Amino acid sequence: MIKLNFKTYTLLLLCLAIFSGCERDISDDAVLASFPNTAEVYTDNPVGLTDEFFISIDPLEGANPEAFGTDDNESFLGSSSIKIAVPGPNNPDGNFVGGIFRDRGEGRDLTGFDALTFWAKGSVNGTLSNVGFGNDFLEDKFPVVRQGLELTTDWKKYVVPIPNPSKLVQERGMFFFTAGGFDIVDDEPNGNEVAWTFWLDEIKFENLSTIGQLRPAILNGEDVVQQGFIDVPIELTGLNLTANLASGENVTVQAAPAYFDFQSTNPQVASVDETGLVSVASTGDASITASLRNIAAEGSLNLTVEGGFNFAPTPTRPAEDVVSIFSDAYQDIPVSRYNSFFEPFQTTLGGIVPVGPENIISYTQLNFVGIVFNDVTFPAEAVQPVDATNLTHLHIDINIQEPLEANDRFLMELTNFGASETVGSFLITGDQLLEDEWVSFDIPLSDFSGLSDRNRIGLLLFNSEAGPNNPTISNVFLDNIYFYVE
């Protein structure tokens, strides 16, 4: 990114004014950097993109870089298109495809456009999981994602509205997408997906001037009332924009916090920065709201702060009897990830959060998430799995950060990466949990149904879904996760 050193330049002018009486305005001497406003991203060829053209999501995360190509026998307009051969779940090169197109220069000025548009078709009526722009794998400051695009077998034009074009004065992330196998049974990622193909053409930014009725939202438009704790930050989630297209269709995109302007009614109690992170500093009440392009966003966070954080009970088991995954009371084993970020279906955000001198795990937008401690899932981050052959229990402290409902569930799964992979599950129901209070569980490993081997346990998965794309519990604190022998 080009940065102009205005401080140095201003000091220079000040010195000139003192010693020579110069009164010239800074605009006579300094010219702000400007960037090209090229609209096209891909026509018959990539336009102004990096030599790589397609930059894949890391193959170590399961992405298949070999799925991307071009097709000179299929196009909407011209003589060529982009062809994506979406892999099946057992493809050895990766079970999904995803990546970005990045501008080869310092970025483009997109302030004159109001939408990203493209044409697409599929070999079947498949779903493009995510599509958008603003991801450059560098800063990723202004990503916008439209989710769940239903493709047909005929060419069709798709529109991704730009939430606030005035922000995009130097954008390098020109296009982003992810797609998984075509599910012939349901929408749940369970291995029954099949490979399919889709094509993209005429990717460009446009000023349609027909996008209206903008409805921004934070927290998915809900007025959330919750307790806050001093020194426990809160990440604002569910940031989106719904816009009406010329066709009459309402389209919702997920928008980065940088598109919004955030406000607090009481910054001494709780303030919010440009990334949407709320910092809680003192007791009292505060409401966090936002706006986008001077339009008030639906949704708010209403905090009552009565003091510090109520920590989970401190474990007292002897350290020699414990293998700790996460606890301030013990020495943790090496863990590669406390948030798996499994692509492309996981929505869960969060991970380790410092709370004063201690730490907890905080997950938001939970559907499923894994704590990864093995040498298989992410080979570049390999750590030694746990040999729990002689261990008897798993301990965990759970604190639900929202009202509980009758159908709420918290499924825990342990995966053993032995000669054959085995998975054991244990279900905690909503009536076993409490809102804003810690509940401790000591679960016999023998109660994890299906866990026939325990010599290489390397994944602890949490899942709140009551069915495909139907999460129940969204916000949860976890602490003191460890195996032990009794």
Image (cartoon, rainbow, N blue to C red):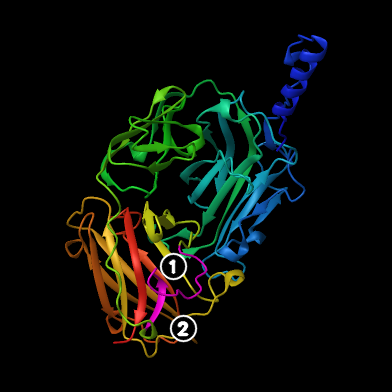
Q: Residue at x 31, y 48 (%)?
A: 229
Residue 225: percent from the left, percent from the top?
A: 25, 41
Q: Magenta stretch: dominant SS?
A: loop
Q: Nearer the viewer, residue 203 or 471?
A: 471
Res 347 seen here: yes
Q: Secondary structure at mark 2?
A: loop
Q: In the rendered image, which residue does mark 2 sit on?
A: 456
Q: In the rendered image, which residue does mark 1 sit on?
A: 371
Q: Are marks 2 and 1 in contact (CB under 8 Å)?
A: no
Residue 261, numbered circle: none
Disc 2 packing (10 Å; few <14; some 14–19; many ≥20)? many
Q: Is 395 included in the stretch rendered in magenta? A: no
Residue furthest to the bottom: 390
Residue 77's image quarter? top right
Residue 132: percent from the left, percent from the top?
A: 55, 41
Looking at the image, is mark 2 or mark 1 earlier in the sequence? 1
Q: Residue at x 36, y 65 (%)?
A: 462
| Part of the protein shown in magenta | 322-338
